[in-house]
Structure formats: structure tokens, C-alpha cells
Image (cartoon, helix red, strand yellow):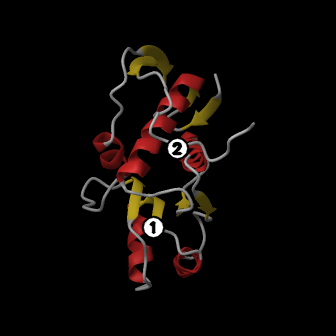
Amino acid sequence: MLYRQFGDGWADVTVAEVAALVGRWQRALKALELDAGARIALCIRNSVDWIALDLAALGSGMVVVPLYVDDNPDNIAWCAGNAEVQLLVVESTHLAQALEDTRAPLPPIRVLHPDADDRRASVAALLAASACTLQGSARCRVRGGTREVMPYRVDPGLKPALEFK
């Protein structure tokens, strides 16, 4: 177990699950044509999703701009604009709408937990569109059940942000 998260009860998250999610995020960021040096803002609660996206971005040489999810939408919009972020990942439909209501210029927004009727681009759609096509699978325990998880492997097309000699 790498992480324990509370949602509908406590859930243990394994290293393999986090690594698989990091790999999916790296592919998604690459599909969005975000290169090393790109700035992405995270306005989501502390969670496995935050950790995976943070690791994926940093591993791809990007700059992560953490924003407080409970901050005033005007402040969030100003910070995103001032930091010149190219992608903004937010927690909810409510927050995305509040940011759009500020009328501030915003980068593309992806919603982590959208409402059922939200037509904005969701994180789930982004990750599904860039799903890994790796060989094999591993069984991992999630919320008392099991699900298939793809094993993590670094995409050979991705260059490491740092190289040690």
C-alpha cells in the first residue's frame, strides 16, 4: 500500500495503481501537446489523483502550479492567469462554473469530479482517450473489491526531466 484515501470509506491504493495512473496522465499530457516547461495548475483536493497528476507532470518536465481548492474563484483565476498556465484541472463542476463566471481569461479546464450533466471536458474522458496499451495486467484491491490495473512502464518516447551521470 502506498496511499490510503477516504471517499466512500477508506481505500488502500497500491504502488502499481498509482504508477498506472501516473502513466495514463503522462500519455494524456503528451496527447494535449504539453511539453517540458509547460505550466499546469491543480485546483483539486489532496488525493491519489493529485499525487498522480503531480508526478506525471514533474516527470515530464512540466511546472505544477498548486492552487487552493477552497480559494475565491477570482483569486484562482488571477493566479492561473498570472502563472500563464496552459491547463487547469479543477475539483468540480461548481468550481469550473464559478471560474467561468469570473469572465477572466482562462486556460482549458478539465473537471475531476463533474456533475452528470456537465458538458465540459472531464478528466475521465481525457484519461480514457489516452489509455495505455501495455501488455499484461495485475489484480489490485480497491475499495473492498478488485479491478484490472495495467502495470506501469515508462513511455520510451518521454524524456526524463533530469538525467544523472
Residue linked to disc 1: 95
Disc 2 vs disc 1: Cβ atoms closer than 8 Å? no
CA–CA distance in space, label 2 to label 1: 17 Å
**Mark 2 surroundings: few (<14), some (14-19) or many (≥20) residues within 10 A:** some
Pick whichever of labels 2 and 1 is earlier in the sequence.
2
Residue 109 point in image, percent of width and height:
40, 65
Residue linked to disc 2: 49
**From the image, which quarter does the C terminus lie in?**
top right
Residue 70 point in image, percent of width and height:
59, 66
Residue type, label 1: Leu
Q: Is residue 14 visible?
A: no
Closer to us: 146 or 57: 57
Residue type, label 2: Asp
**From the image, which quarter does the N terminus lie in?**
top right
Residue 125 point in image, percent of width and height:
30, 47
* In-image side of 126 versus 65 (left or right): left
Residue 136 point in image, percent of width and height:
38, 14
SS class, disc 2: helix
Identified at 68% across, 41% down, the residue is 163
Identified at 44% across, 14% down, the residue is 138
Identified at 42% across, 82% down, the residue is 105
Q: Is residue 152 above or below residue 105?
A: above
